[in-house]
Amino acid sequence: MKDPNDIPAMMAEIGQRARTAAAELAHATPEAKAQALSTAAATMRERVDAILDANVQDLAFGRDKGLSDAMMDRLTLDAGRIESICTGLEAVAAQDDPVGRIMAEWDMPSGLHISRVRTPLGVIGVIYESRPNVTADAGALCLKSGNAVILRGGSESFHSSGAIHACLVEGLRAAGLPGDAIQRVPTRDRAAVSEMLTMTDAIDVIVPRGGKGLVGLVQREARVPVFAHLEGIVHIYVDAAADPDKALRIVLNAKTRRTGICGAAECLLVHRDAVPLGQTIVDGLMAEGVEVRAEGLSGSVPASAEDWGREYLDMKIAAKVVDSLDDAIGHIRHYGSSHTDCIVTEDPAAVARFFERLDSAILMHNASTQFADGAEFGMGAEIGIATGKMHARGPVGAEQLTSFKYLVTGDGTVRS
């Protein structure tokens, strides 16, 4: 490895090694990839204490840096969370391998047989902030999809990510796969991020996973294509025909289960005919310690114009009374981030209109927005929630990290 103080040279070497590994990984067997992930999970279980010790160092760094409670929650690992990472690795290992899968095939009158098959993207760069579990999720999904990956985690999770990454490399070696298939940038220096964004010869796509500042930086400066994971400005609309018990349980869970994840509810919209129910929900949120910034309801403080379209990632939520379903849809269109939005109602027509008129990556009905997660979608894990409309959208799992190629077969066939 090049001198870590010479960032351009170091990143160029990492990129070259990733490109070489990607060429080998593209035709790795499904069995080898599954073995690598299973071994990585077993290694993590053996090294729980070492991973927790590394996390203690990161938590101390985070406290010194003045991270919010929500960010500290994202950073924190415990035995239960490490076990969840391990089961996620095993879930990805058990999935069908997407590489080489036939998406469609057909015959032409010319005598050609044409098939469209899934193929890896190549080298993926993942830039993320304080969640060390992303190291495992991104590494696993890129490996499963036949891609090499360059991981650049946040400075806060430096030690935890390093300990997890070491387990992934152990899995690769045990399966006879190139260790360079999953590389981690070994520096906190932000210059490494700037280098990644311009490595067009080495990296095929960048996936930023973090707050608005990080994603905005990547989108502004990247010369490499980007899968955007923007803010989770998540809305829940409680319709006039909402079931009171369902509405209360859904909103409380969506806001308070984990406030620091992108699927946490940030704005509650209540139909004017459901104001008594809306007030019950607001009272329940405040009883759980949530600061409710309300308009048309009695909350903790009155809402201001700055409260709409805001991602709190904290025990705070905006709440507003709307005159109709269409008013709710209009509000979400104006202030939302096309991430996840939910309607709570027993009216099928309202659900149909909500689903038809909104174009968020994830739309939900009578379910907590905390389910906006690749693992909960059966993907084993996710590399992020893509809010754009090109290539990948919603939870990005292994299948979304592939492209395709056409295989065309003839029998001495010539064109007239």
Image (spheres, grey):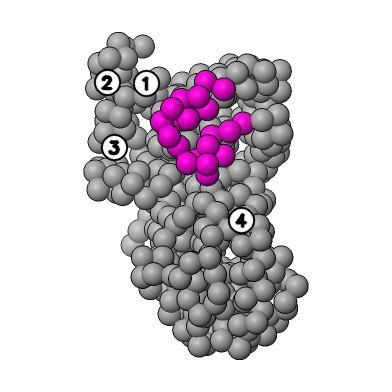
Instruction: Name the amino acid, label 2.
Output: Ile
The part of the image, by quadrant, that contains residue 126 is: top left
| Rendered view: 358 above or below 271 | above
Q: Position of residue 379 (x, y in %)?
A: 63, 48
Camera-near label (4 vs 2) is: 4
Element assignment for label 4: loop
**Dot 2 and dot 3 residues touching (CB under 8 Å):** no
What span is colored magenta in the figure?
A: 56-77
Q: Nearer the viewer, residue 344 or 410?
A: 344
**Is residue 163 rendered to the left or right of residue 123?**
right
- Give the Cα separation between the discs numbered 2 and 3: 13 Å
**Is residue 172 rendered to the left or right of residue 86?**
left
**Is residue 87 rendered to the left or right of residue 169?**
right
Q: Which residue is mark 1?
A: 187
| Number of other residues with Cα within 10 Å of mark 4, as a class: few under 14, some 14 to 19, many 20 or more | few
Q: Nearer the viewer, residue 21 or 170?
A: 170
- Give the Cα separation between the discs numbered 4 and 2: 45 Å
Who's the residue at 31% across and 32% down the image? Answer: 193
Q: Earlier in the sequence, mark 4 or mark 2?
A: 2
